[in-house]
Amino acid sequence: MAIEMQDDRWGDPEAEAAARDKAFKPLTREQAQALRLKDPPLSPWRVLMVQAWVGVVVALFAALLTRKQEAGWSALYGAATVVIPGALMARGMTSKLSSMSPGTSAVSFMLWEAVKIAVSVVMLVLAPKIVQHLNWLALLAGLVLCMKVYWLALLWRGRSKSN
């Protein structure tokens, strides 16, 4: 019994390229403008502003719930460990240098993401020295809830597209 080996996994590259070219139709200027109006980009600065507000609300809630000022400051510092590095990254990624070419954008993204992580880690290491009577639970609550704003922004954007 002979088994025939067939190696058609890749298909015909020329036929696939022709099919892609045939299916691709560039947008007109009016169509591109209408698409931008229908689906505007989400500003990183808006997300950071919402994160900052969430941090303030969490800090006030922590202070009121525990009746201790230290819990509020700890939660606010936790929020700051998300907002400050995020602002650094947003500033770096929105600069003209970061958008010169696709390669530059990719390298810039990796660089600013590394800066963001490093600043966050340094801020967490310095937390006991900066915040008097640090409450780690409140700090983590502020940090986690501010990070979740990214997911809320994505969900909010997804729902606004379907409307």
Image (cartoon, rainbow, N blue to C red):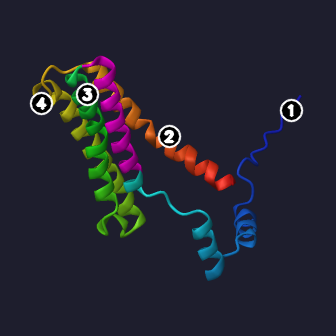
Give the alpha-carbon distance from disc 2 to disc 1, as whole Å. Answer: 55 Å
- Whether residue 36 is in magenta: the answer is no
> Which residue is identified by label 4?
130
The residue depicted at 20 percent of the width and 23 percent of the height is 70
Residue bearing mark 3: 72
Q: Residue furthest right?
A: 1
Front in this rendered view, residue 141 or 97: 141
**Image position of 102 with respect to 75: above or below:** below
The amino acid at mark 2 is Trp
Of tags 1 and 4, the one toward the viewer is 4
- The kind of secondary structure element at disc 2 is helix
Q: Nearer the viewer, mark 1 or mark 3?
A: 3
What label does residue 2 carry, if any?
1
**Which stretch is magenta?**
47-67
Instruction: Give the residue at mark 2.
Output: 151
Q: Position of residue 148 (x, y in %)?
A: 44, 36
Eyeballing the image, is 143 above or below 52? above
Q: Is residue 149 left or right of residue 8?
A: left
